[in-house]
Image (cartoon, rainbow, N blue to C red):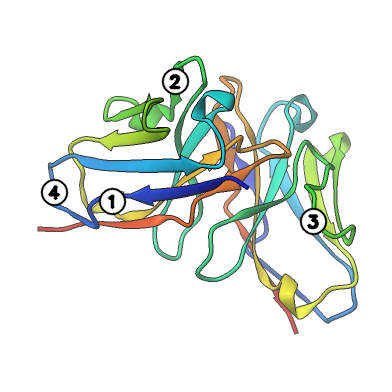
Amino acid sequence: NFMLTQPHSVSESPGKTITISCTGSSGSIASNYVQWYQQRPGSAPTTVIYEDKQRPFGVPDRFSGSIDSSSNSASLTISGLKTEDEADYYCQSYDSNTHVVFGGGTRLTVL
Amino acid sequence: QVQLQESGPGLVKPSETLSLTCTVSGDSISSSYWTWIRQPAGKGLEWIGRIYASGSTNYKVSLKSRVTISADRSKNQVSLKLTSVTAADTAVYYCARDLSGSSSAWGQGTLVTVSS
């Protein structure tokens, strides 16, 4: 079964830059689009990156996405960290049957 | 602006059927595809399945025997049925539009507890 692996947690100081990785278990992660969702406590997820690197309207350009085929990973980079960025972040892609697969989520702490 | 509202019983007995409805406003359910996702307390997101505007559906393999997603265009609603529930099905259930596109939108979620 295709899986996406994320670090359980990351932390960084306000104003800094952080990168969250999402590694595919098999195949090429570049074969299907990767999305990233932000989930603040008590709220539903919202999309911060879709189709590997696209930002929905209203998402600041401090958020960026990329794909690294050599490591079979996708990454979410957040620059100029703000306390409001503190949340859980989930990557999402598809398996060979185009079924949706989520990563386990990464808790971002901004301290 | 599209709004999605999940609704249904908050408590379901073991072995019974969980039934939820996602009522869509500000958009037609015929315009996109709709996805159900769940999240147990303190855990990650789990995809349940989706329905396309054509009516075709896809389900997570491990849930396929118990899940049905359907659409009622007259009411602009998408529904989820999950049979033979157990405590492991206790979760917040979300519906979402166009999960992985620029117009992605989620409902606020509804908590379903399976307990006698």
Circle 4 residue:
B14
Kind of residue at badge 3: Gly
Residue B57: mark in rendering: 2
Q: Are marks 2 and 1 on the same chain?
A: yes
Residue A83: mark in rendering: none
Q: Are marks 3 and 2 on the same chain?
A: no
Comparing labels 2 and 1, the label whose residue is closer to the camera? 2
Q: In the drawing, does residue B49 fall left or right of residue A28?
A: left
Q: Position of residue A28 (x, y in %)?
A: 76, 27
Comparing labels 3 and 2, the label whose residue is closer to the camera? 3
- Rounded to the nearest whole Å, what is the CA distance between mark 3 and mark 2? 31 Å
User: Of residues B15 and B31, which is closer to you in this image?
Assistant: B31
Q: Identify the secondary structure beneath mark 3.
A: loop
Mark 2 touching mark 4, by CB under 8 A?
no
Circle 3 residue:
A58
- Rounded to the nearest whole Å, what is the CA distance between mark 1 and mark 3? 36 Å
- Rounded to the nearest whole Å, what is the CA distance between mark 3 and mark 4? 42 Å
Q: Residue furthest bottom?
A: A111
- Rounded to the nearest whole Å, what is the CA distance between mark 2 and mark 1? 23 Å
Circle 1 residue:
B88
